[in-house]
Image (cartoon, grey):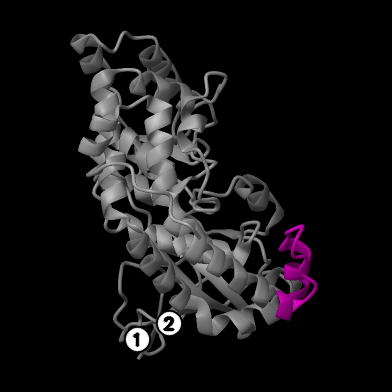
Amino acid sequence: MMKKLCLSLLAWVLCLLALPALAEEQPLLTLWIEYDAEVELSREVAVPATITQQHLGDPSSYPAQLRLHMETGDDAERVLPQRSLRVDSVDRSFVLYNDGNDALNTKVVSAACDALLARTPVPVARNWQEAAVVYVNGEYQGLYTLRWPVERLCEAVLFADNMDGITVTRMGKPALLGDSAGLDEELRLATELDLSVEANRQQLEAVLDVRGFLGTLAVNAYLGNPFMFNEMWFCQGEDGVWRCVPGEFTFALYSAQYDSMAKIMKESGNEPEQKLARALLGEAAYRELFLQYVGSLYQAWTTPVMQAAVDAGYALIRDELPRHVARWAEPFAQTVTDGRYPVANAEEALLYHQYRLYRLRDKTLVTRPWYVYDSVQRGLNVSDEDMARTFGGPKPELPQV
């Protein structure tokens, strides 16, 4: 039985630096929801749009169906862009994610990272996402990814009933909600404290969830996210403690050899999150905690585990890829770029995606754990004994791929 309901998907995906511009460029659309109440959804999903959401067959193997009906706007406004689209309703907003320099690959990577975070042994908030085949007024638009917004993630992290009185921001940036001045000032002072003094550590932990920050840092380091500091959000509720939540992992696992610790410990790095990370890792107690976190990831996120996550992410979109690429044939020819493998059409885009998937699964994921081990030991000057203690064993040989 079909029922029309007005629901809200809770707003915005954190990762897109281009979102403010997109919000200005795209029309604000009034959308309604057409929702099949008889279909059991796998998780809480509510979207400020006219939407029919259902799974075809096994929900673990197929993307959801997302049917939007746009009541306003001309025909041009009713065609979704290849880039991610932000849609605002009266009180909520959401993003259909279809972005990234290597859009098909990043869909698989994001899904894989989401699956890994579901079994992470370290304290880090996990965003929700789901692949969806999108139609607008009955016209096929392609594969998109539904995401929880950063506000919704923060609401869950803070166990808040609503967003009243909550601040959501990044360090040194305008706040998404509330005022970011408190975060910048409190954490700037924290970087100037002598953290070897227990009283100073207690002062810091009164305003910052240090374990959550180090957990988020460890996850980004392990996954080799080159934009890790751009993808750290902070939220504050009634207790006055700032908590860190991760942003996007679009460019994670792009290179097995990415030296995360060189990025974190770079003395000339001026990003405020980077300065905070260096200050924490300069203190023995926090450095030990970070070592334990990365070591736990090293033992939990082995190559077979990561490959299984990639396989599962790919299975969600595999059957839909040819139709999606055909829908966006010209944009893919223009945006999928690799100097060695220029893409000229939809068929070549699919072949390129298969090559990227092979490189990710059978090369990057095979050697990434070794490079993490090496990066952490060199970056923090850790002894062989302490590495073996926190990582579960001695440094292995570099796999040959």
For mark 2, what is the residue?
62
| In the image: residue 325, left or right of residue 339 | left
For mark 1, what is the residue?
58
Magenta span of residues:
329-348
Q: Quadrant of residue 55?
A: bottom left
Provide residue 178's location: percent of width, then percent of height.
44, 32
Residue drawn at (47%, 60%) of the image: 110
Provide residue 264's location: percent of width, then percent of height.
47, 30
Q: CA distance from mark 2 to mark 1?
A: 6 Å
| In the image: residue 358, left or right of residue 163 | right
Closer to the camera in the image, 57 or 347: 347
Residue drawn at (66%, 61%) of the image: 83
- Amino acid carrying label 1: it is Asp
Task: Please give the count of numbered marks on the rendered protein.
Answer: 2
Closer to the camera in the image, 76 or 130: 130
Would you call the spot at circle 1 few (<14 residues within 10 Å), some (14-19), or many (20 or more)?
few
| In the image: residue 275, left or right of residue 326 | left
- Amino acid carrying label 2: it is Tyr
Provide residue 193's location: percent of width, then percent of height.
34, 9
Can residue 240 be seen in this snapshot?
no
Point out which mark residue 318 bears: none
Q: Secondary structure at mark 1?
A: loop
Q: The N terminus lies in which quarter of the figure?
A: bottom left
In this view, 265 is above or below 371: above
